[in-house]
C-alpha cells in the first residue's frame, strides 16, 4: 500500500507539471474543439456565443512566457497614457477605429477574470443554503460591469474560473445569452489546485515517509495569475476579482486616470534637478522639529506636503475598498437569497436592522477622537452611490436606489489611515495601511492624540484594518512591472523561487487575501494604496460587495458610513495643515 501511494503521488506531480507546461506554452484564446487540462487540474472550454467576434481575433500573442523581452532595470509602466486614451475614446470612435498593434489604436481590449468557488450557496456567512449563487448574484453583477464597458466601445472577454467540477451546458448558455453581443467567454472548471499538506510545525506532512496531497481550496484565488500570464500580450488591461464584486467602466477609467497622474508626477521628479516633484502652492512649513519613525519606516508620521522622489512616487497605487449598501427591507422585503427574503438575524421579527438598533452607525469607532468634518460636501461635492452600487430594482441581494448615507465600510477605519497632499494632479489623498518598510509617508490620523493610548503605534499589517479590495486591475506593462521588478518572487508563475514557501500554497503565501485581497501587492511588493479625497474620484474607488451579507455577520462596531469616513479624512487633513503652522 505505501508503494502504491508513493506511485500515485509521483503520477499526480508529473501530471500537474505537464499541465502547467501546457498552459504556459499556449496563448490561444480561440474556440477549441476539445477542452484542455490546465494548471492545478480542471478543464477549460471557450465560446464566443456564436453572436460576434471570435476570441481568436484578439491581438496575437508574442512571447508572454519565457523569452519575453526584459525591460531595463529602471523601467516603469509605459503604456498607461496610451491605454487611457483608448479607454476614453467615444463609443463611436472606438467602434470605428480598427488600428492594431502595440502602439496602435483600436478599441480597448479588456480581459475580465472572475473567480467563483461555488455555483450554489452553502448556507455559510449569512447566505441561504442552496440559493443559486451563479444566477442570482454572480451573473447580474458581471453583466452590469461588462455592459458598462461594451457601451464605451471596448472589446471585452470574460474568463470564469470555477472551483466546482463542471458547468452544465444549459448554465453556460445562460451566461452566454446574458452577456452583451460580441463578448467572448472562457470557463475553467474544477480549477482548485493540489498541494502538499504541511505539518503543524511548518514542515511538510510526511506520514510514513509520504507527503499528503490534497485539494487547496484556498489556492483557487491564485489561479487567475496563470490566466494572466497566458493572455498577457493579448489585452491592454486586466481586471481580476472575486465573484461578488461589481466592477464597472467608471472604476477602470478612474484607475487609469490616477495611474497617469502618478506616472506624470514620477517623470517630473526624474526630470527635475534634484530628483524630486513638489506640490504646487504648498503651504509654508514652519515646523522646526520633524517626527521620527516609531517602527521600520524611513519617515515619520507627520508628512504633509513634502517633496517626493521618483522612487517614492513609483510606489503609489490607486486602491479600492469594498462597500455594502444598508439593506433595510426587513424579513419580507427581499433580503438574502430566497423565498420571501430573510430577516436580519436579530432574534426577533426581522423588522429592525442590527446596524440601526442602538444607533450603531451613529456611534462609530473613534468618533470622539476624529469627528467627521462634513463641510467637504458643500465645498467639494458628495459621494455618488450610483457609481459603485446603482443596481436595477428587483434583485434579491442588492437593494436598488441607494443613498449616499447607505454606503457602509467595515474592513478598515480611520485609525489605520493617513492623508497627504501629493505632487501634480494626484492632490490630496488618503494613505491606506502598508508595511512600515514600504511607507513613503503621510500624516497619520493618530498624530497628537494616539487615540488616547500612549502605547498605540500606527497600524501596519493588521488584518482587520487592511481594507480588502477582493481583486486588482492593471495594464499590461504594470503587470510586467509587478512581475519583473516590484514583487519579490514575481507576480505570475512559476512560483518556485526562494521567496515562496514550498509550492506557494502553504499558509504563509496561500491565503485568499494574499492573492486577491492585496497582501502581496500592498505588502511584499511595496506599493502604497491611496484613495483620492476628491468625492467624485473617491466614489470611483468604492467597489460593491454585492453579496451584501457582512452587515448581518460582522460585529456592528466595525461599521461606519462612507460619508462619515470621508468626513474623518477631511478632519485629519485640517489637522495636517494646522500642524504646518506650528514652530
Image: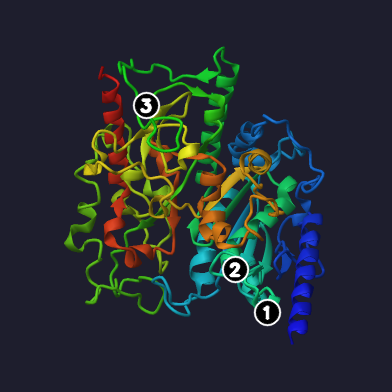
* 10 Å crowding of disc 3: few (<14), some (14-19), many (20+): many
Callout 2–callout 3 Cβ contact below 8 Å: no
Quarter of the image for residue 335 reads bottom left
Observer able to see residue 424: yes
Residue 208 is marked as: 1
Q: Earlier in the sequence, mark 1 or mark 2?
A: 2
Position of 411 compared to 89: left or right?
Answer: left
Question: Which one is closest to the eye, mark 2 or mark 3?
Answer: 2
Label 1 and label 3: CA atoms lie apart by 60 Å
Callout 1–callout 2 Cβ contact below 8 Å: no
Front position in the image: 141 or 160: 160
Label 1 and label 2: CA atoms lie apart by 14 Å
Q: Which residue is found at the position 38% from the left and 66% from the top?
A: 549
Position of 37 compared to 427: left or right?
Answer: right
Label 2 and label 3: CA atoms lie apart by 46 Å
Q: Which residue is found at the position 71% from the left and 70% from the top?
A: 41
Quarter of the picture holding the N terminus: bottom right
Residue where numbered disc 2 is placed? 198
Location of residue 64 in the rendering, given as x and y in whole percent from the top left corner: 77, 47
Front position in the image: 390 or 51: 390
Relative to 344, does residue 422 appear above or below in the rendering? Answer: above
Residue 64 is marked as: none
Residue found at the far top of this picture:
273
Residue where numbered disc 3 is placed? 304
Quarter of the image for residue 545 reads bottom left
Amino acid at each position: 500500500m505505501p508503494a502504491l501511494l508513493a506511485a500515485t503521488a509521483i503520477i499526480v506531480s508529473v501530471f500537474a507539471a505537464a499541465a502547467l507546461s501546457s498552459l504556459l506554452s499556449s496563448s490561444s484564446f480561440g474556440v477549441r474543439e476539445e477542452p484542455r487540462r490546465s494548471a492545478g487540474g480542471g478543464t477549460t472550454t471557450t465560446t464566443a456565443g456564436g453572436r460576434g467576434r471570435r476570441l481568436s481575433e484578439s491581438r496575437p500573442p508574442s512571447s508572454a512566457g519565457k523569452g519575453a523581452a526584459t525591460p531595463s532595470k529602471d523601467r516603469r509602466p509605459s503604456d498607461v497614457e496610451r491605454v487611457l486614451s483608448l479607454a476614453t475614446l467615444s463609443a463611436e470612435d472606438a467602434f470605428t477605429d480598427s488600428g492594431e498593434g502595440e502602439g496602435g489604436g483600436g478599441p480597448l481590449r479588456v480581459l475580465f477574470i472572475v473567480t467563483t468557488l461555488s455555483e450554489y450557496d452553502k448556507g455559510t456567512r449569512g447566505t441561504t443554503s442552496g440559493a443559486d449563487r451563479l444566477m442570482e448574484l454572480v451573473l447580474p453583477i458581471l453583466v452590469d460591469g461588462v455592459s458598462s464597458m461594451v457601451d464605451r466601445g471596448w472589446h471585452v472577454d470574460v474568463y470564469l474560473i470555477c472551483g466546482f467540477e463542471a458547468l452544465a451546458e444549459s448554465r453556460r448558455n445562460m451566461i452566454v445569452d446574458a452577456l452583451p453581443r460580441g463578448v467572448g467567454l472562457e470557463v475553467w472548471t474544477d480549477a482548485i489546485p493540489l498541494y502538499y499538506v504541511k505539518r503543524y510545525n511548518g514542515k511538510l506532512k510526511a506520514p510514513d515517509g509520504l507527503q499528503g496531497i490534497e485539494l487547496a481550496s484556498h489556492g483557487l484565488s491564485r489561479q487567475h495569475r496563470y490566466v494572466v500570464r497566458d493572455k498577457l500580450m493579448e489585452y491592454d488591461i486586466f481586471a481580476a476579482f472575486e465573484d461578488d464584486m461589481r466592477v464597472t467602466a467608471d472604476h477602470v477609467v478612474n484607475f487609469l486616470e490616477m495611474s497617469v497622474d502618478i506616472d506624470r508626477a514620477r517623470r517630473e521628479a526624474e526630470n527635475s534637478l534634484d530628483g524630486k516633484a513638489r506640490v504646487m502652492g504648498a503651504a509654508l512649513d514652519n515646523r522646526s522639529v520633524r517626527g521620527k519613525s516609531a517602527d521600520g519606516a524611513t519617515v515619520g508620521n507627520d508628512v504633509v506636503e513634502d517633496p517626493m522622489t521618483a522612487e517614492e512616487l513609483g510606489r503609489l497605487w490607486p486602491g479600492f475598498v469594498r462597500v455594502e449598501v444598508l439593506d433595510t427591507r426587513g424579513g419580507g422585503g427581499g433580503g438574502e437569497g430566497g423565498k420571501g427574503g430573510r430577516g436580519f438575524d436579530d432574534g426577533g421579527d426581522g423588522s429592525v436592522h442590527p446596524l440601526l438598533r442602538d444607533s450603531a452607525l451613529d456611534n462609530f469607532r473613534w468618533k470622539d477622537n476624529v469627528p467627521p468634518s462634513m463641510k467637504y460636501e458643500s465645498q467639494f461635492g458628495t459621494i455618488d452611490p450610483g457609481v459603485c452600487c446603482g443596481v436595477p430594482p428587483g434583485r434579491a441581494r442588492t437593494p436598488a436606489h441607494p443613498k449616499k448615507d447607505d454606503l457602509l465600510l467595515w474592513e478598515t477605519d480611520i485609525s489605520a489611515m493617513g492623508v497627504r497632499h501629493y505632487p501634480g494632479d494626484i492632490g490630496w489623498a488618503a494613505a491606506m495601511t502598508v508595511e512600515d518598510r514600504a511607507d513613503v509617508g503621510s500624516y497619520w490620523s493618530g498624530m497628537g492624540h494616539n487615540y488616547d493610548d500612549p502605547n498605540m503605534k500606527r497600524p501596519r499589517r493588521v488584518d482587520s484594518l487592511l481594507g480588502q479590495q477582493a481583486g486588482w486591475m492593471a495594464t499590461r506593462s504594470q503587470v510586467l512591472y509587478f512581475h519583473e521588478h516590484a514583487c519579490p518572487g514575481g507576480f505570475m508563475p512559476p512560483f518556485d523561487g526562494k521567496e515562496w514557501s514550498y509550492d506557494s500554497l502553504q499558509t504563509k503565501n496561500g491565503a485568499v487575501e494574499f492573492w486577491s485581497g492585496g497582501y502581496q501587492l500592498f505588502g511584499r511588493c511595496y506599493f502604497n494604496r491611496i484613495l483620492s479625497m476628491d468625492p467624485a474620484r473617491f466614489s470611483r474607488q468604492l467597489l460593491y460587495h454585492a453579496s451584501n451579507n457582512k452587515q448581518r455577520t460582522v460585529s456592528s462596531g466595525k461599521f461606519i458610513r462612507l460619508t462619515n469616513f470621508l468626513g474623518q479624512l477631511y478632519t485629519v487633513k485640517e489637522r495636517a495643515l494646522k500642524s504646518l503652522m506650528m514652530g
